[in-house]
Image: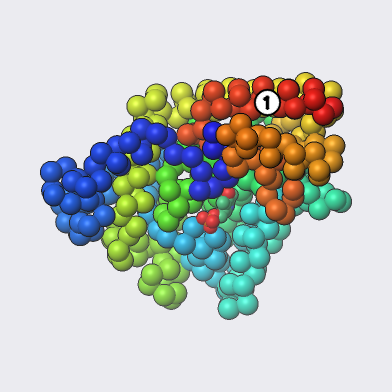
Amino acid sequence: MNFNAGPAALPLAALDRAREELLDFEGSGMSVMEHSHRGKVYEKVHSEATALVAELLGTPLDTWDVLFVQGGASMAFAQIPMNFLGPNMTADYVVTGAWGEKAVAEARTIKALGGGEPHVAASTKGADKSYVRVPKQEELTLTPNAAYLHVTSNETIHGVEYAVGPEMPFPKAAVPIVVDMSSDILGRRVDASQFDMIYAGAQKNIGPSGVTIVALKKEMTARGRKDIPTIFQYRTVAENQSLYNTPPTFAIYLVRNTLTWLKSEGGVAAIEARNRKKAAAIYAAIDGSGGFYRCPVEPACRSIMNVVWRLPTAELEETFVKEASAQRMVGLKGHRAVGGIRASIYNAAELSWCEALAAFMKDFAKRYG
Ligand SMILES: *Cc1c(COP(=O)(O)O)cnc(C)c1O
């Protein structure tokens, strides 16, 4: 039972298919990763993967560019201001956790190189330096004519997610909205049309590490600067169907396998129903523990992808992780920046794992509470 935060569990069906196809891909006598990225055999995989992202995310290819790039979401933190935050411009950032902080910090480095100014439109960092919620719309100090507004839909480390219920919807703005969806992309239904750019490292919800999905409305791609290095322009990647340089073909192949599995499971609506059940099982174990377990996140913003909680002491948390691991539950140690416990329960994590974890939590609380 793999609760790793990323790289994370992959669906068995996607891995099985990879094993079966590994040595002889579609009768070609070699593996998919040995094919030219410009040959017919790989081309089919590449366009299938692109089409699956577009279909499942709701970003149709006539109005959106769907790209595969490298460097992770971390590179996007720099590449986005490089492309869109030119001199004398401002970009607004909503910060609801550690990843949003990093995005702002990278934008500041681009300012130092002659870019525009990142502005924190809202930060929900508490007095104890932690994040337990997303802001309400009226808390945002938006810049008129900002180059874009940047939002993190799910803060993976703090377990804070936007719009898990209707009370805390995504921010609205009259400028393009860019969203880092690394840890909840395709984990639930989201109306993509409210955004102008969606990006996500694949290694949490939709594949292995090594590839990043970037979807931009075509007007957004066109808006990018032309005086930055060619390879960093999203335009370059879009004009070349993500084949400007050699893409991570095997990672894209595994994204294709993973999304084929997602579709066969009933698509995003079906996976969302399952994801909500998974999260509910663990939150119920926390809330039903009489205070032994504490989730710091406000209920309206509790992530359905990364459930975080504390035990009464750091020693008990260590014992919890150790005993869970003896029961074959791995990856439960909280991020080193915040401590505590975190269960990452992306699409490929099974409901039965979450139920087993909840049962273990009840038993543990009985013994140590
Ligand atoms: C994991 C994560 C990142 C960083 O991803 P890399 O692919 O390691 O660069 C950025 N943002 C969010 C929300 C994440 O969960």
277, above or below 314, in the image: above
Helix, strand or loop at disc 1? Answer: helix
Residue 249 percent across, percent down from the top left = 30, 55
Q: Quadrant of residue 143?
A: bottom right
Q: Residue visible at 48% across and 48% down?
A: 203
Number of numbered discs on residues: 1
Residue 228 percent across, percent down from the top left = 44, 74
Colouring method of the image: rainbow
Residue 19 percent across, percent down from the top left = 29, 41
150, above or below 87, in the image: above
Which residue was labeled with disc 1? 360
Q: Quadrant of residue 11?
A: top left
Of the pair 174 and 341, the residue shown nearer to us: 341
Judge the density around disc 1: few (<14), some (14-19), many (≥20) Cα neighbours within 10 Å.
Answer: some
Give the position of the C terminus as an image quadrant.
Answer: top right
Indicate left or right for 221 with 169 as reference.
left
Mark 1 CB lies closer than 8 A to ligand 1: no
Indicate left or right for 242 with 204 as reference.
left
Q: Is residue 60 visible?
A: no
Q: Residue visible at 64% across and 69% down?
A: 108
User: Residue pushed farthest bottom?
Assistant: 113
Give the position of the N terminus as an image quadrant.
Answer: top right
Residue 104 percent across, percent down from the top left = 65, 62
Of the pair 314 and 182, the residue shown nearer to us: 314
Q: Residue visible at 74% across and 30% down?
A: 299
Indicate left or right for 93 with 176 as reference.
right
Q: Is residue 87 visible?
A: yes
Kind of residue sitting beneath label 1: Phe
Q: Residue visible at 16% across and 42% down?
A: 26
